[in-house]
Structure formats: C-alpha cells, structure tokens
Image: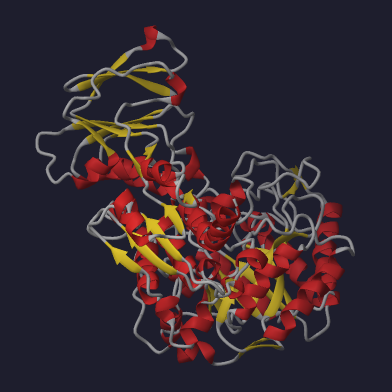
Amino acid sequence: MTRRISLRMSVSTDILFQPIALGTTQLTSRVVRTAHGTGMAVPHITDRFIDYFVARADGGCALSIIEASRVHPSTGNDLQLYGDQIVPGYRRLMKALRPYGMRVFQQLFHGGNVYSAADGGTPWAVSDIAGPWGIVGRPMGQCEINELVEAFASAAQRAQEGELDGVEIQGAHSYVIQQFLSPYYNNREDQYGGSLENRCRFLLEVARAVRGAVAPGFTVGVRLSPGPNIAVTAADCKQALELLQREKLIDYVNLSYGDHLESDNIVGGMHHPPGYQLASSTQIGSIASVPRIVTGRFRTLGEAAGVIHAGKADLVSLVRATIADADLVKKTREGRAHEVRPCIACNQGCIGGLIRGEGMRCAVNPAVGRERELSESNIRRSELALNIVVAGGGPAGMEAARVAALHGHRVTLFEAQGALGGTVALAQSAPNLRTLGDITQWLEREIRRLGVICHVNTRATESAVRALRPDTVIVATGSVPRKDALQPAMLGQRVAGVELPHVLSSRELLTQTSFEGAQTALVLDTVGHYEALACVEILIEQGISVTYLTPATSITPYLQTTWRDRPALQRFYRRGSFTALTRHGLLEIQHRACWVRPLDAGDSGRTLIAADRVILVTHNRPVMDLYHVLRGEWPACLVGDANAPRDIQAAIREGHLAGRRAATLRRVAAVT
C-alpha cells in the first residue's frame, strides 16, 4: 500500500474552506485532526492537554478528534472515559475552545489484546490468540460483550454531557472491533464468529447502542481500516460500512490503513509518499453515502485540496502537519504558506515520545506539550535590542538565531561550511531522508526573512566574535566523528586497524563518490538511530554485501520507537545481502576483514567477517573549543551537538530555548 498516488498539488485551496456538515455538526472547513495519542491526559484532561488543543483551534483547524480513550477498565490507554469525572474536564476543554469555532469529537476505544487492562491485568479480548505485542486476552462471553457495548454507549453519553460535538467509534488498527472483524483473531463459534456478517455483529451492536444513548443531533462516526496482516480486507471494511449506513447509524466515516503487526503503515514515516493510504480509502469510500475523512502523511493544504478536487475524500486529516505548526491553516489562508514549519515525517517526537514514555513531542516544534510556555504567540519584542552572535549554522544555531530575531535582537550567524544546514545538509542526501532537509531549508528562509546576518564559509573565531562586541554568544559548532571505534559496552578495548584507509565515518561515506572494488562492508553502530541504517542502505544500493554489528540487543533500538526500522529492514533484505549481528563487539580491523565476537561469549567466540569497507557509526565528539575560549569574556551557552552529540530534536529544542534566554543570559552576566 505504499505505491505513489498522484495528487494535484497546484490546485486552489479554496475548496478546503467550503463548509460541510457531519450529521448536524457544521464545520467551517475540510481540515481535520484525527485521533492521536498525546500522553497529556493521564488519566484525565489536564491544562497541558487543553493548551495543546487551543493552539490548533487558534491556528484554524475545523475539527479535532480526541485521542482513542478507554471506555472500560478491561483495557489500557491514557484518557479514561468511564466514571463521571471526565465530564468536568470536557467542559473545561470546550469552554476554552468555543471562542475559536473548532468542533470536537471523542474517539471511543477498547484495545482488546493490544494493551493490558487498566490495572495491568488481563484485558478482555475476542479470543485467546496473542495480540500483536504478545498479550493474551481473556475471551469475552456474552455477559462481557453486553457490558462492553454498554460501556461504549455510556462513554458517548458522557461526551454529550461534557458538551462535545460528537463521538467516533474506533473500529480500526488492530483494536477490539477490528479483532472481531479479523478471521485471524476471531475464531469464535458463536453468533460473533464465522461469516463476515457475524464478525460485524459487535460493531453494529456498539453503533446501535451509541446512537441510542445520545440525542438525535449528536454526531456519530466510525473509523475503519484494512488490516492486511490480520486478514481484514478493504472489501470487509466496505461491507461493514454498508451495514452501518443501511441502518443510518453513522454520520461520517474516517478511513485509515493498517494494523499493529506493521504499525508503520498506520502512521507512515518519511519513506511513505503523501497519500499512501488513498488506494484502500478510495475503494472503501466508493460506497459511502456519508462524508469521508482520509489520512496519509499530508503536510500542506495544497496536498489536501488535491485529494478533495480528485473526489477521493470530503475531508482530509493533517495531524502531524499541525503538530509541527499549529498555525498551518491560518498561515496558508493569509498567504504565508512559506512560513509554515514543515513536518519532516520522522515520527521521532510524536510517536517516539509516546512509546518512550516522554509524552508527545515534535522534533521540529519544541512548543508541543509546552504551548503555554513556548508558543510563539507569547514571544514579545525585547525593549532592549541586543547584539547576539551565533556560531554554527546547523539546526540548533539557526533555531537560536530565528527565535532571537523574533525577540527583536540583532543576530549575526557564522557558518564554517559553504552552506547552512550543518550535518542535516549532508544527511538529507541519504536514501529516504530527503524530507529531513525541509526543516533546515525552512529555518534558513526564516532567519533570512527576519534579517539575521549570515556569514557562510566563515568560521567563528575568537577574533571574529570579539570584533562584533556581542552581548551574548550562542555556540552551536556541532560535533565531529571520533574514528576510534569506541564501544561503550567494551570500554578499555582498543580496536586495532581504525587508521586503515578503508575505515570511514558515516560522514565520509556520504561524501564518497566511488565504491570501486568493494564487495563487502561492516557497519558498526553504537548509536542506535537512523544514521547506521542510512549507511547500510547506501552500501546495499551499490551492490555491496553488508554486515550490521551492534552491542545492543536489537537493531537501532531508538529508531524502533519511531516505526521506521521495519520498512528499512524490508528494503535491505529485498535489495541485497544483509546480515545483522546484535549484542556483538568489534575487536580488530584488517585490510579485508574484521574480527568480531558476541559480547557474552568471551574470546572463544571470535569470528572473522569479510569487510572491504568498515563504517564507524559511533558517538561523536562535541566541538566546544570556542565556548571555552569565550565564556570568560561573554555570556555564552552551548546548544545542540556542541553541548552533547544527540539528534535533531534535541538540537532544535536547545536552540529554541537559547534564543528565548539570550536577553536573560546578558542580564545575569551584567549583574555578576
């Protein structure tokens, strides 16, 4: 389902601002934010949660659907809908949102065998077949089914009491309703199993109960998706939709794709093209008599308008795009589309933050989850314009310069390379990383628009900085590869042969133009991010057989939280020879081979691996010399990799905070 869909990108966006009704709920536009986890409502609605939604309402979105929330204690997830304590939270949320005109629905959810119960115990499920992450649920009898149906209805009633505009039944993405639809999970021999009509029975019972529990004008919708790994087809979803429409149980259908055996298809990363879910959504929606919402990595209003012009949908979801920039709709309508901060589809903060237990964040927008503190609407021009120098033109340095300029300071930026962008300018040339460069290109446009003076091909030396007599210096000079094959799991183990000419850093590999004579390669990865996989893919595309070696217990553990590892592995195994050695260490590099061993086997486990090229993807060394030289004379701060080598999310966040605090740094220094 990842084939490229043709979208008309140059069409007018006016079609998006034609009003539409979902039942009796009137929307001012076709721009929707479908349900997505935030980690900000655990287990009830918080001020942070409200601030997050207010920012998107102020930014012009017509409808937001609150994240999948549990209707019964027999399933886990964040927001709790059973119990009347949810109603005051809803009313606080709606009071904050009403001035902006954005409508709000609540998605009603039960996870089946995907999550443990709310108390950590056994969840209720369709059968005793293990779920996608290995949880075995307790098969429901008729009493439990009846109780769960009633729980959906009660949750809908509470949403109405809380003054929301509607509810959506979650029937997609491996959760309990899709498990009933699945002949893989549903091996029941009662009236809920067997034929597709029987497997749709639970969905219909839930929809009838929900519809009967709320007032006639209250909007009710459903989310459906094919689940190719659990044998739920687009044709199955189409028939389920037909049954729901026949009884007039729903006011709209929200179409998605995927199941949690391949989660990356649900929230596609940068390897997916915009509209990658449209093939199945269009098939299911072809019989829709109610409005259709579609999703699929759309980032701009132009892309969304193209979908509606083509007749493939009535409304389009832009979730990650409006996480990256809450004002996407407002800016575009005002003719400022070029000012929209782009989503790079990395999934690092939005999906990854949730999985890592940090709560939802955004790699390119540090304000997410901290809207009250960091929203750009609360940036005020400083009464005293300072003279600020930024050393380094990567994402950290440019974000610092941008925010300082928004405060009205005079900013001069030095970049030693011939172009801005830092490491990202190089990384974006790797396969499937093109959109990574969108954020640094946007940052460059913004700092130039805001009047930042940029000196490229100019290193920020002590004398160059001193000549400008700055009030504050922000040091964002990045990091450099170590090239010593240092492995944290083997401290004290010196790797012989690192000085050999066929041993390269990832940066050197990206600039290499000739791979002549290379047939085999070893990639050592101690970082666990996408960097090593990018190196592997470059080599495989050159027809080179690659051994990936890591001291971790799994391949790129950090990347697994973004759902971008599995698609990369699929490409590797499909295109060429690829071997992964986990929990291994590199011992010695020879001219055409490397000695390696399992970390837990001792010297007796030594193995010789063929390697014409050796790529070292290890933690870099921060470049902070300028900081140490300047800090005694000026207030100075380190940001990004110069502070500690990490990733783009940390770099942009630290740059943003430094830009906000520049005046504070200067005042503190003046006092001391």
Q: Is residue 224 left or right of residue 148?
A: left
- Seen in the picture, residue 353 relative to 242 is either above or below; the reply is above
Q: Residue at x 59, y 62 (%)?
A: 368
- For image coordinates 58% across by 77% down, the residue present is 32
Q: Is residue 316 above or below residue 359?
A: below
Name the residue nearer the viewer: 435 or 217. 435
Location of residue 249 in the rendering, given as x and y in whole percent from the top left corner = 72, 78
Residue 343 visible in the shown view: no
State the colouring used for the structure image.
Answer: secondary structure
Q: Is residue 551 visible?
A: yes
Look at 81% across and 58% down and name the residue there: 148
Rendered image quadrant of residue 521 = top left
User: 658 left or right of 135?
Assistant: left
User: Relative to the observer, which residue lies in front, 497 or 159?
Assistant: 497
Residue 270, image x and y in percent? 40, 59
Q: Is residue 47 above or below residue 464?
A: below
> For the N terminus, which image quadrant?
bottom left
Residue 637 picture location, percent across and down: 48, 50
What is the quadrant of residue 72 in the picture? bottom right
Q: Which residue is rendered at x = 72% and y = 69% of the image?
A: 50
Q: Residue furthest top?
A: 604
Asked whether, in this view, residue 231 is left or right of residue 247, the answer is: left
